[in-house]
Amino acid sequence: MSSEDRSGTPQDSAFDEELVEQVLRRGEGDTAQAIQLDRDVRRMRSALRCVDRGQGASASDLSQRILSQTTGEDLSWRGDLRLVGRYLRTGLGASPILRVAAASLLFHLVALPVLAYWVWAGQADPLELSFETYERAHPSQPFPDQPRDVAGPLPVGGVVEEPLVLDHIPVDAEDYEGQNPDEEASSSGRGGGSQR
Amino acid sequence: MTEDWKAESDPLVALGQGDPKPFEAFVIQETPTFLAFFRRLGAQPTEAEDLTQDLAFKLYRQAETYRAEGRFRAFAFRVARNLWIDRVRKLGREPRRTQGALREDMPSLLYSLPDERQAEPGLALEHREEAERLLVALGNLSEGHRLVFELGVMQELPYQEISEILEVPVGTVKSRMFHAVRNLRSALEGGANLPSSGSDEGAAQ
């Protein structure tokens, strides 16, 4: 202990550790010093207990909060709801930004159905947005609006295609023998006059 | 639910046996006590609420394994003291800063005092000034001295229980109490607050 600490006040000589213990234990004193010390201790208690009294409301809230989470905890769905509600209250109470965000969300949730009803009920001219759509026409087909060509479609290249003779030449010899004699004669005539 | 918990059985023993009423009465009656206890040790208001809540939860969870040894009140204060030490270590506060926290927080502590000016303006002002001086003196004490003063003077626990709670010899408790009371007595009379020293602990031990 420092010398400064030992020097202390003038009462130091009048009271010591034993006296303090005696006063605190018995709450009263036999001597004048003990009575004075007891009075001072009571004054200290009284003044410092103002701090206890000053926080009565928060202490009451706190004790209720503690009990609701210990012996009074409701394990049913109602308890869950209460817990969520308390969580939301605490969060909303703590943050102004969260309050603004929640108010905005609530406004939108309420306003959107009202606005939709107002528009669809015809109380106001809804925005008329018209889109003209056309079917995508095939290049070979005429556009629906154009007059049809009575002569029908033109052949490709402007010439009527007829089947070529070569397309009908039989491939096998049997097919060749079974052919019409006139046809055979004409074919030999066309082949030239070497047989004559 | 609001009856005196001390008149009934040990709250945790009762809780272990399925009777929550003594524990509820304890929470309702002693929450202000522990709030003020933590505040006077230097906790901020929200910190004191957290610590008090943690204390109640800790006691509640111990109900199944709890064995009554001595008075329940002393046991609760031991748990509270351990919580305070854990919190101080967790926050990495230096001891001196913890001592100073009470002084820094003095305005809010004093504003929280009940306003009695309407009843007796002069007396209320005198009380406030007295309370302010004492709180400053309390903030000047070391943590060991403050704890001893808090438990011995404010909570009126006997030296033996304080010794068990703080895990220090009874002689150390006596010595710390003497110096704490002397410093606060000095503040009560409007004198200079003497800085406390911890060297007396070594001598006592």
Image (cartoon, helix red, strand yellow):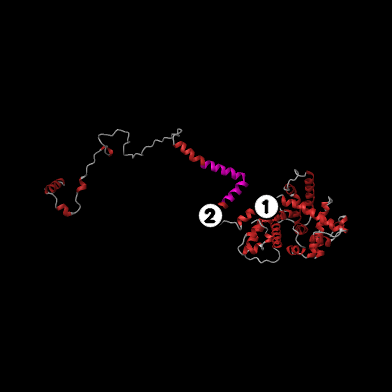
- A94 magenta-colored: yes
For residue B56, side relative to residue B97 (left or right): left
Instruction: Give the quadrant of the C terminus of chain B.
Output: bottom right
Secondary structure predominantly adopted by residues drawn in magenta? helix
Q: Residue A78 or A133: which is nearer the viewer?
A: A78
Instruction: Give the quadrant of the N terminus of chain B.
Output: bottom right
Give the spatial CA distance, label 1 vs label 2.
28 Å
- For disc 1, the neighbor class at 10 Å (few under 14, some 14 to 19, many from 20) is many
For residue A36, side relative to residue A128 (left or right): right
- Image spot of residue A2 (x, y percent): 85, 58
- For disc 2, the neighbor class at 10 Å (few under 14, some 14 to 19, many from 20) is few
- Image spot of residue B31 (x, y percent): 68, 55
Residue B195 seen in the current view: no
Magenta segment range?
A84-109
- Image spot of residue B63 (x, y percent): 63, 63
Q: Tell me the kind of residue under disc 1.
A: Ala
| Residue behind mark 2 | A77
Which image quarter: residue B125? top right
Q: Tell me the kind of residue under disc 2.
A: Trp
